[in-house]
Image (cartoon, rainbow, N blue to C red):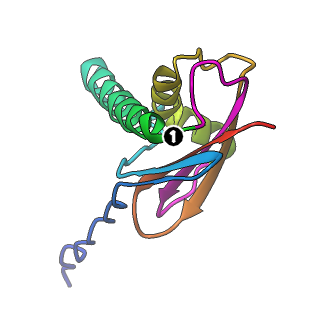
């Protein structure tokens, strides 16, 4: 007996882009599908294009939010950045950081601070749901 092709799965949707500005924090949600591409076989130009695109989208979105946030200026002493990856499947912790590295670089670009600076504290989290996206929270450190 021949088996037919498996039924096609509907791809997971993207989270909608959102931005919320509060007194001491900024919350941004981006429709990005960030994966750990370390084990993927892809041409270096494809990887470079994808990474550049993720970094640019993130940087532009964070820059726009910071322009509306009254508490932010380049002299702000220290901030905590919380990155949350939303996807149907979870990654382990080191792969999570690797998957979000272009997002991290985009946030640092928008802030105008090197991502290795002591002024920035990075935290990572994952949320499992049937959608893809990234949530960014930037909060002043007390």
Image quarter where the C terminus lies is top right
Between residue 42 and residue 91, name the one nearer to us: 91
Q: What x and y, as percent, mark residue 15? A: 37, 61
Between residue 9 and residue 105, name the one nearer to us: 105
Q: Is residue 14 magenta?
A: no
Image quarter where the N terminus lies is bottom left
Q: Residue at x 52, y 24 (%)?
A: 111
Is residue 54 rendered to the left or right of residue 122? Answer: left
Is residue 65 rendered to the left or right of residue 26? Answer: left
Is residue 85 rendered to the left or right of residue 122? Answer: left
Residue 111 against residue 135 in the figure, above or below: above
**SS type, badge 1:** loop
Is residue 53 rendered to the left or right of residue 87? Answer: left
Magenta stretch bounds:
71-91
Residue 94 against residue 33 in the figure, above or below: above
**Residue corresponding to mark 1:** 69
Q: Residue at x 65, y 46 (%)?
A: 24
Between residue 56 and residue 95, name the one nearer to us: 56
The image quarter in which residue 79 lies: top right
Q: What x and y, as percent, mark residue 131? A: 40, 64
Q: Residue at x 66, y 37 (%)?
A: 94
């Amino acid at each position: 007996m021949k088996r037919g092709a498996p039924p096609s799965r509907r791809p997971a949707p993207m989270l909608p882009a959102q931005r919320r500005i509060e007194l001491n924090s900024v919350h941004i949600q981006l429709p990005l599908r960030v994966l750990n591409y370390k084990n993927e076989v892809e041409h270096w130009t494809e990887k470079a294009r994808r990474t550049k695109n993720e970094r640019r989208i993130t940087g532009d979105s964070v820059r726009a939010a910071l322009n509306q946030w009254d508490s932010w200026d380049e002299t702000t002493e220290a901030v905590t950045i919380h990155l949350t990856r939303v996807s149907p499947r979870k990654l382990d912790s080191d792969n999570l950081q690797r998957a979000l590295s272009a997002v991290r670089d985009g946030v640092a670009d928008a802030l105008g601070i090197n991502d290795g600076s002591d002024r920035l504290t990075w935290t990572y989290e994952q949320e499992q749901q049937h959608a893809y996206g990234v949530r960014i929270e930037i909060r002043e450190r007390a």
